[in-house]
Image (tube, grey):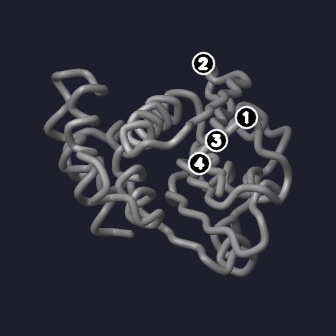
Amino acid sequence: MTKNVILVGVGGQGTILTTKVLSKGLVEMGYDVKMSEIHGMSQRGGTVVTQLRYGEKVYAPNIGDHEADMIVSFEKMEALRALPYLKKGGAMITDDREILSMPVLTGEQEYPEDCLDVLAKTVGNFTLVKAGEKAEELGNVKAQNICLLGALVTKLGIADKVDWKRIISETVPAKVVDVNLKAYEAGCAMA
């Protein structure tokens, strides 16, 4: 059976790196994995979405509306935007980080203050992980992504199926390996 996972965030949060780590681990577990990336205006703080499908045999990377088993959001408004992809009975993990988009900064749009309330009421299997806060506490807010990875693999029940710490160590820059390994452990614990 094929599983569908969407990771969504804002440019610079490490959404694509996280998806690559997840892909490597799933391949090591013997799954066929397909991944796609959508970069919007990512270098200007725009939305970044990765779609990942894994299973015995996967033919295409794209996930349609109401098909995602799991959505991981690095920013709470992006979680709201991704909600149409979540299937009935699907799960969502989100950070409570708030990153204001250009339309919000210029006053063209308002940031929805009730994001987390809407998500908690709408998604039956909803998990709030304060990954950004934890990563900042560990010394590098950019480790938020790997903290969320820890929560994700724990929720998917695959945290003990492969050596995620080795894969993280091989994938992230050498100078931030230690903080990312701590962030991963924290994410596993917070899930």
Distance, label 2 to label 1, CA atoms, is 30 Å
Looking at the image, residue 134 lies above or below residue 87? above
Residue 57: image x %, image y %? Answer: 64, 41
10 Å neighbourhood of mark 4: few (<14), some, or many (≥20)? some
For the residue labelled by badge 3, is the local secondary structure a helix, a strand or a loop?
loop
- Residues marked 2 and 3 touching at CB (< 8 Å): no
- Marking on residue 55: 4
Three-letter amino acid code at the position of disc 1:
Tyr
Give the residue at x 72% y 81%: 121
Distance, label 2 to label 3, CA atoms, is 33 Å
Three-letter amino acid code at the position of disc 3:
Lys
Looking at the image, residue 173 lies above or below residue 138? above
- Residues marked 1 and 3 touching at CB (< 8 Å): yes
What residue does disc 3 label? Answer: 57
10 Å neighbourhood of mark 2: few (<14), some, or many (≥20)? few
What residue does disc 1 label? Answer: 59
Viewer-side residue, 169 vs 55 = 55
Viewer-side residue, 151 vs 80 = 151
Distance, label 1 to label 3, CA atoms, is 7 Å
Looking at the image, residue 188 lies above or below residue 64? below
Q: Upstream in the sequence, badge 2 or badge 1? A: 2
For the residue labelled by badge 1, is the local secondary structure a helix, a strand or a loop?
loop
Give the residue at x 60% y 64%: 92
